[in-house]
Amino acid sequence: MTIVKLPDGSLKEFDSTVSVKDVAKSIGSRLAKDALWGEIDMQPVELDYEIPQGEPVNLKIITKKDPNALATMRHSCAHVMARAVMRIKPGVQLAFGPTIDGGFYYDVECDEPLTEEDFPAIEKEMAKIIALDEPFERLERPRSDAIQVCKDLSQDFKVEHIETGLAEDDSLSFYQQGEFLDLCRGPHIPSPRRIGAFKLLSIAGAYWKGDQSREQLQRLYATAFFTQAELDAHLELLEEAKKRDHRVLGKRLGLFHIDEMVGQGLVLWTPKGSFVRQKLQDFISEHLQRQGYDQVFTPHIGKLDLYKTSGHFPYYQDSQYTPLVDREYLSQLAEEGCTCGELANLMNEGEIEGYLLKPMNCPHHIRLFASEQRSYRDLPIRLSEFGTVYRWEQSGEIGGLTRVRGFTQDDAHLFVTQEQLGEELIGCIELVKIIFGAMGMEDYTVRVGLRDPDSSKYVGDPENWDLAEQACREAAQTLGKEFSEDPGEAAFYGPKIDFVVKDCIGRKWQLGTVQVDYNLPERFGLEYVGSDNKPHRPIMIHRAPFGSMERFIGVLIEHFAGSFPLWLAPEQGRILTVSDKSEEYGKRVESQMRNGGIRVKGDYRSEKLGAKIRDGQLEMIPYMMIVGPRDAENGTVSIRDRIDGDLGAIPVEEAIAKFQTEIADKTVRRKSS
RNA sequence: GCUGCUGUAGCUCAGUGGUAGAGCGCGUCCUUGGUAAGGACGAGGUCAUGGGUUCAAAUCCCAUCAGCAGCUCCA
């Protein structure tokens, strides 16, 4: 008698010996077909495994739908990959080899570095290993034995990991497949037969345990699927994603340029890109005005004293452009025979006079606040500026519009009383909500950064912190969207709310941010006169709903795949003449459209209509207005929509009205796919 | 900053130790065509920069700069 207990708690009894497959069949033919392997008392077994008779066993039948099935298979594939690498390159040290979104990796250290040229050989070896069809066998070892096993294998990283990361574990598990033995928590698939299709993707450096001061390993990225078709579809998806990369589209659509001669991470906005940026600024400005913000302008540099007071210099020196040293100060130093090394030391200690390219706008705004006597009646004071800041980002981090060295924040600083904090935070959140709403961006996450209660690194009164954190939570709730609360993620000066989106290849970027600050008002000694006629310290809110114009537009290009909504499109429409004969009418339509406030251009080249349409389509022009003799006669344009294609002929006035409505409504139209 | 890869015409990319090619784009001409590429001819390159090896380097080596992927970082 075989007794099987299924995950739902039900029991099944069989008179004779049955395999996992037989049990699946008894439940349903569909399950039998979809079954990949079984798990008996948590241990993976093959479908033809014969279930022991007697005592009831817990059986789970794993199908593709099981959320862990793919990850388990990929992890087993990682073992196969590591085994293949060890066969090809002797003396390989293994580190970690986990599963990640879309695949897996294994960190290794080789005497002689691996390159992508080694991929075919590794893949071939993997195929051989899979063909051997050896099972993954689990072994449990007490910790002292486990250390010895890893030492015998000369796997130093594994030894270290057992001694540090796994210091609490009394017993450790290994998985063995043929000659390959690896410290591993598991689980694994019963046999490599379930690895359907795999592919090595890329190779990159990675630090052991993510620590920059430790060994740098080689990380082999790869992926695997149950079927070749799924792998192909995945690879195609990756290719598609690359096409919407804002760096590719930015070049193709002529939105921005980054020039070697100007400098790394310094964006030159072309007329088209500038247009989009300006439109976005105008858009948010309307809402700032409505919310009672005051627009200000401040210079791009400030004296070092300003940043010494704010605490940014010399503390954050590494991420700033080198200061512009005061001319007289420099010549004085020169007279005193100061060497370069001494100058650098002075700079490190902050003992230097000069100016700094501003890494943030707050100190300037703070000095504006402090420039007048303030009463509680004046508060809240909301100073906004599209302020350009410069930060010396690490060279390896810079790329496209999403990480740059000079960028413009849609910045503002609110000086508020404790009582006003909550309401003002809600106002800030509303702006973010308006922006994401207008762009049709749903796919973002919200993080509320709270202080770590055990830490003493935070400035400000703990009671105020509690109030501010609560205010942040409540403000975040007004989004009507889930948010995470992250203790320890607050800045040392106050809690914050961050808005994060992913780019086309899955990298996460912070866009909007709202931060409470108890620190700077203190450092600058800011005050207002309260109703009690006594001085009080205001609280500051830093906020930037876009984050930075550069990063936001970078993400926006990918979000729209280059097809901006009509109100944002630099070129909203294009007049296409069927032949030269219609040029005069085309020009008339063009000026009619312009007078109606529509941004149009005319394509009067002696090309065939099909070619002009193709060009317009590739340039993602929202509307093409085709004009030929028929239209000239009837006073119409034949509209071709970027999304829906030919819409037929309508009178010019009607077309203008249609566009005006779409612009005024800021409609986001997307391909319904 | 670190590791690996890459750098050839405006763009996308071929290419060999013996001093450069395609497609697109651009210019001129022909074509006058109603919803995704009409044709011909032509112009355009210190093969990223600086060294080195060699009779000979765009090709091999080194350095620098820049780009890409990842790691680390991001007040």
Image: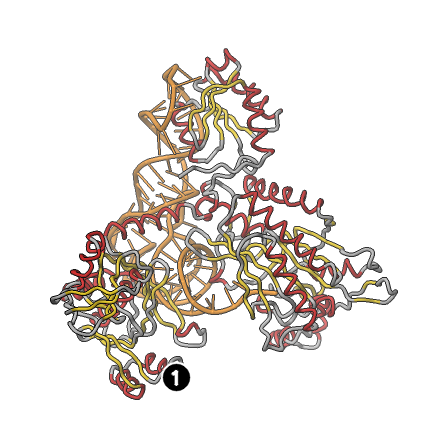
Q: Nearer the viewer, residue A456 or A246?
A: A456
Query: In the image, residue A139 lies at what x, y percent?
Result: 24, 79
Q: How many marks?
A: 1
Give left or right: position of B50 versus A658.
left
Q: Nearer the viewer, residue A628 or B14?
A: A628
Does residue A72 appear anywhere in the picture? Answer: no
| A492 is higher (above) or lower (below) than A641 | below
Per the image, the residue denoted by label 1 is A167
Q: Chain of mark 1?
A: A
Give SS at disc 1: loop
Name the foreground residue: B30 vs A458.
Answer: A458
A314 is higher (above) or lower (below) than A171: above
Question: How many C-alpha atoms fall within 10 Å of the one at disc 1: few (<14), some, or many (≥20)?
Answer: few
Instruction: State the residue at coordinates (64%, 42%).
Output: A282
Residue A120 found in image quarter: bottom left
Q: Position of residue A209 (x, y in %)?
A: 41, 74
Colouring convention used in this rendered image of the protein: secondary structure
Specify the amino acid type for callout 1: Ala
Image quadrant containing the C terminus of chain A: top left
Q: Is residue A225 above or below residue B45?
A: below
Q: Nearer the viewer, residue B48 or A486?
A: A486
Q: Residue at x 24, y 65 (%)?
A: A11
* Residue at image coords 48%, 39%: A563
Q: Position of residue B7 (x, y in %)?
A: 38, 52
